[in-house]
Image (cartoon, rainbow, N blue to C red):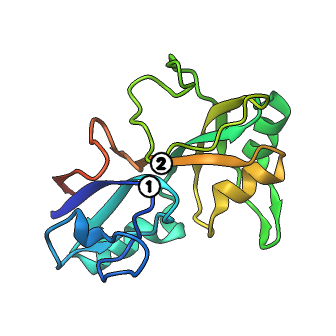
Amino acid sequence: MSQLLLLNKPFNVICQFSPHPRYPSLADYVPFRDLYPAGRLDTDSEGLLILTHDGSLQHRITDPRHKLAKTYWVQVEGLIDSDALEKLSTGILLKDGLTKPAQACSLVSPINEQGDPIGLWPRNPPIRTRIAIPTSWLSITLYEGRNRQVRRMTAAVGFPTLRLIRKQIGSLTLDDLEPGTYRWINKW
């Protein structure tokens, strides 16, 4: 059994330990240097990042042949409709080919005054807002991991992504981890 470190990666943190001239790195949040991210999370995305020292486990988590589901909460510009959700669920033709079927649904959760799900941390800096254009939240579960896939999929159905949070990888979830905090687990 290996130990995994689950990190809630904040917005605008780069997924590497080496210093970056513009962005904070994982080294600013994780004091251990013998760990490696199992997959990436774009700098402008937030949420669950798994780190491990076990190279074969890292490969197993990221290899698409293992079909490890990844669930994201996505705030989009506009009020998402059933047609767009259906297209996201059945597959979207992107420049690099047709996406695999995904699970997509409106996020049914109590919403606070800012329009975010209750219990969700505020983003720093906040997303841009337009008074005349509403936003909505959805949940998307992918079984593949293309570059900026969720953002490209929502844009392709007419709902650009404003905020992207990875909530779950396989059975591992963020639970109550605050941005920039981590916890160790024994898994696999």
Residue 175 x/y as whole percent: 30, 37
User: In the image, is residue 97 above or below residue 20?
Assistant: above
Q: In the image, what residue occupies the spot 17% across and 78% down?
A: 33
Q: In the image, what residue occupies the spot 80% across and 29% down?
A: 81
Left or right, 79 with reference to 70:
right
Q: Could you tell me which quadrant the C terminus lies in?
A: bottom left
Left or right, 106 with reference to 120:
right
Pointers 1 and 2 in contact (CB under 8 A)? yes
Q: In the image, what residue occupies the spot 82% across and 53% down?
A: 156
Corner quadrant of residue 143: bottom right
Q: Answer with mark 1 or mark 2, whichever residue precedes in sequence.
A: 1
Please tell me whether mark 2 sits on a helix, a strand or a loop: loop
Q: In the image, what residue occupies the spot 29% across and 78% down?
A: 17
Q: Tell me the kind of residue under disc 1.
A: Phe
User: In the image, is residue 69 above or below residue 63?
Assistant: above
Residue 128 x/y as whole percent: 63, 44
Along the viewing direction, whichever of 84 and 126 lies nearer the viewer:
126
User: In the image, is residue 13 above or below residue 131?
Assistant: below
Please tell me whether mark 1 sits on a helix, a strand or a loop: loop
Residue of label 2 = 125
Does the rendering let one see residue 48? Answer: yes
User: In the image, is residue 180 above or below residue 30?
Assistant: above
* Marker disc for residue 11: 1
Residue 11 x/y as whole percent: 44, 55
Local crowd size for mark 1, using a 10 Å CA cut-off: few (<14), some (14–19), many (≥20): many
Q: Tell me the kind of residue under disc 2.
A: Pro
Along the viewing direction, whichever of 42 and 21 lies nearer the viewer:
21
